[in-house]
């Protein structure tokens, strides 16, 4: 079963805000366009969610009514990090266990990933749906588990994952707006649109268009107001970048670190961690040529730990090399980059405008190195859709 979004012209956008410096560069290509289109895409995702509400609820409501349901969020690379962003937030909202398990772990270790044979909703994220592990993970789930349903969240209606599950009895395919099938090497609008669509599907109370409008307005403000500052950061030529956050924002930090690693073809080394965990050894990565970006949580208790590491790093590093993003006001950390009008939003939604900063930094760093962001790997060792993976036969239950 497929719940399709409304038709939108690929690559189309109704952007009304100025484009940041990096996005004005002709070399930014599809990557620049796909970063810039996100506020408009988020609004479209909210409209699509409202239009297919009955189909989604008919599929999900009986499953969510089960106290013994296990929800597994899966994907590879950035698609896996969609799950890492959502899992803590959904666990808190749905009061049930929600786990992020990458397809790469499911395919290589199905007996461990599905060791407990309980009713399961497998939520598969995929930009193209053509990565070798995408379908293999769902096939293994069907083989190992007695009762499993599939929610497929993808940006490509012609991908193998969407084709296989489009008419399957225990599956629902949620298609993202077509322009989110990013043509660039790195996933940008695909990441944020799949995260938002899944949150809106699983949390009915979040479906009001007003909150998505505020998120989109905040994203537009980040693109408009922080673009030149991000370009200046990238121009400094940092050799190492660290992203830190707590709860859902740890998953966002991981995705942020991947973006700069991908778009600079590894020339800028990146790292991520939780705010509290960073002190336990990983802080050794910081040197004189490092940039640290700290995402402050909106949860008042959790935010204290984010503030602690931001203050500590500013004392140990040059303050100009520590960027702190916030949505809710901080009484302890000054000189922050504030995302407007989201001070009461859950971190999973605040993450959407936050990640624009990381995407812009990765793009600007790529351009500063003389690379082509749409194809940053000159050797071709890393591809937009993963190649060379052999899915071996599995004889287990």
Image (cartoon, rainbow, N blue to C red):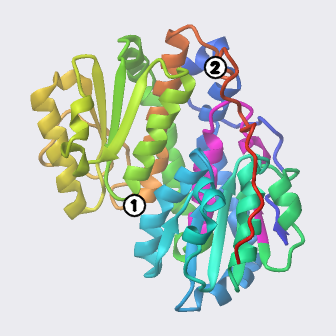
Q: Write the start and end of the magenta stretch as one range.
A: 172-200
Q: In the picture shown, does residue 96 fall above or below 321?
A: below
Which sits in the foreground, 345 or 307? Answer: 307
Residue 95 counted in the magenta span: no
Pair 2/1: label in front: 2
Q: Earlier in the sequence, mark 2 or mark 1?
A: 1
Residue 6 in view in this figure:
no
User: Residue at horizontal 77%, vertical 36%?
Assistant: 12
x and y, in percent, of residue 163 in the image: 88, 59
Q: In the picture shown, does residue 194 fall above or below 23?
A: below
Residue on which disc 2 sits: 377
Quarter location, residue 311: top left
User: Residue at horizontal 19%, vertical 40%?
Assistant: 310
| The label number, if any, that marks residue 87 in the structure image | none
Q: Is residue 209 left or right of residue 285?
A: right
Which sits in the foreground, 365 or 163? Answer: 163
Q: In the picture shown, does residue 299 fall above or below 57?
A: above
| The label number, if any, that marks residue 345 in the structure image | 1
Q: In the picture shown, does residue 94 fall above or below 241?
A: below
Label 1, secondary structure: give it. Answer: loop
Number of numbered discs overlaid on the protein picture: 2
Label 2, secondary structure: give it. Answer: loop
x and y, in percent, of residue 208 in the image: 56, 68
Q: From the image, which quarter does the N terminus lie in?
A: bottom right
x and y, in percent, of residue 65 in the image: 59, 91
């Amino acid at each position: 079963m497929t719940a399709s979004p409304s038709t939108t012209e690929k690559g189309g956008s109704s952007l009304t805000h100025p484009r940041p410096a990096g996005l004005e560069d002709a070399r930014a290509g599809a990557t620049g366009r796909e970063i810039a289109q996100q506020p408009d895409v988020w609004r479209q995702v909210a409209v699509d969610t409202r239009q297919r509400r009955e189909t989604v609820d008919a599929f999900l409501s009986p499953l969510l009514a089960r106290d013994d349901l296990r929800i597994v969020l899966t994907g590879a690379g950035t698609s896996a990090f969609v799950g890492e962003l959502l899992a803590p937030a959904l666990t808190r909202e749905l009061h049930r266990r929600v786990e992020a398990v990458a397809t790469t772990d499911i395919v290589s270790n199905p007996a461990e990933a599905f060791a407990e044979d309980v009713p399961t909703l497998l939520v598969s994220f995929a930009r193209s749906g053509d990565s070798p592990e995408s379908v293999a993970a769902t096939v293994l789930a069907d083989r190992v588990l007695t009762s499993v349903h599939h929610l497929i969240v993808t940006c490509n209606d012609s991908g193998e994952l969407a084709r296989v599950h489009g008419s399957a009895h225990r599956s629902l395919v949620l298609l993202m707006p077509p322009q989110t099938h990013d043509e660039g090497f790195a996933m940008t609008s695909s990441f944020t649109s799949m995260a938002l669509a899944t949150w809106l599907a699983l949390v009915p109370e979040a479906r009001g268009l007003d909150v998505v409008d505020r998120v989109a307005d905040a994203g537009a403000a980040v693109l408009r107001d922080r673009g030149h500052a991000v370009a200046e950061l990238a121009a400094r030529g940092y050799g190492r970048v660290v992203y830190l956050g707590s709860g859902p924002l740890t998953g966002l930090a991981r995705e942020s670190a991947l973006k700069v690693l991908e778009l600079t073809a590894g020339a800028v080394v990146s790292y991520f961690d939780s705010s509290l965990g960073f002190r336990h050894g990983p802080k050794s990565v910081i040197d004189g040529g490092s940039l640290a970006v700290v995402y402050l949580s909106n949860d008042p208790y959790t935010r204290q730990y984010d503030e602690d590491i931001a203050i500590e790093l500013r004392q140990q590093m040059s303050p100009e090399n520590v960027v702190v993003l916030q949505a809710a006001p901080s009484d302890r950390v000054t000189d922050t980059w504030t995302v407007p009008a989201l001070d009461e939003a859950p971190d999973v939604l605040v993450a959407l405008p936050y990640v624009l900063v990381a995407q812009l930094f990765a793009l600007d760093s790529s351009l500063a190195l003389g690379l082509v962001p749409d194809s940053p790997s000159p050797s071709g060792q890393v591809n937009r859709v993963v190649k060379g993976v052999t899915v071996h036969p599995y004889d287990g239950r």
